[in-house]
Amino acid sequence: MFEWGEVEGVDFYRLSLTREDGLPVWEETVRSTSIRYPESMSPLEAMSYRWEVLAERDGEMAGQQAANFTVKPDPSLREVEGDDKGSLLIHAARFENAGYYAEAAALYARVRGEESDARIGRRLAWLYWNAGLIAAANEELDRLQ
């Protein structure tokens, strides 16, 4: 799942994903601030990638965000088992300890839901920051105030 902060008044967002060697993998244009990597595409190989989202308004760039991530297959980090907060937190800690910061953040966000828990909010901000999702980290910090 790719997610980014909203830019007011834009027409659409253009997301591009490239491999560490610069070869393009996928590009999509959307109106929302998130999109899933298509299941119809080949799974990402174990390597580093860069994703970038450009916000466009009236044919001009109105905002940009980019981040790098590495696919590091780990068979012990399969699908999350259980949907209760305890199971989600245990699995989030496993992801975090393995260096999968964006995945850990997604689970912490599910635990938090709409509640305002400063401990989880600070953890989310840290995870977003370490995943290269600076705008999301800043939004989380703003939410804490």
Image (cartoon, helix red, strand yellow):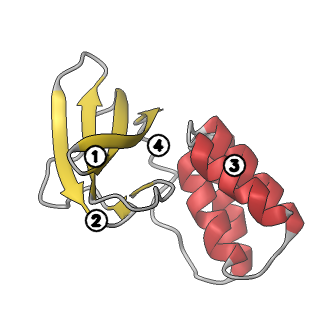
Alpha carbon separation for disc pair 1 and 2: 11 Å
Earlier sequence position, callout 1 versus callout 3: 1
**Residue type highlighted by circle 1:** Leu
Q: Report the number of discs.
A: 4
Depth check, mark 3 against mark 4: the one in front is: 3
- The percent position of residue 135, horizontal first and vertical second, equals 59, 46
Q: In terms of sequence position, does the residue under pointer 3 or pointer 2 come before the other?
A: 2
CA neighbours of label 4 inside 10 A, class few (<14), some (14 to 19), many (20+): few
Name the N-terminal-most of marks 3 and 4.
4
Q: Which residue is mark 3?
A: 138
Helix, strand or loop status at disc 4: loop
Label 1 residue SS: strand
Q: Residue 9, percent across and down?
A: 39, 62
Q: Please report whichever mark, 2 or 4, sits nearer to the chain's N-terminal start.
A: 2
Q: Which residue is mark 2?
A: 31
At 69% from the left and 75% from the top, the residue drawn is 111
Q: Secondary structure at mark 2?
A: loop
* Residue carrying label 4: 74
Give the Cα distance between marks 2 and 4.
Answer: 33 Å
Could you give the CA–CA distance between mark 3 and mark 4, rounded to whole angstroms? 29 Å
Rendering coords of residue 39 (x, y %): 19, 61
User: Can you see residue 105?
Assistant: yes
Kindly report the distance in space between the C-alpha atoms of the residues bearing marks 3 and 2. Answer: 22 Å
The residue carrying mark 1 is 15
Q: CA distance from mark 1 to mark 3?
A: 20 Å
- For label 3, the SS is helix
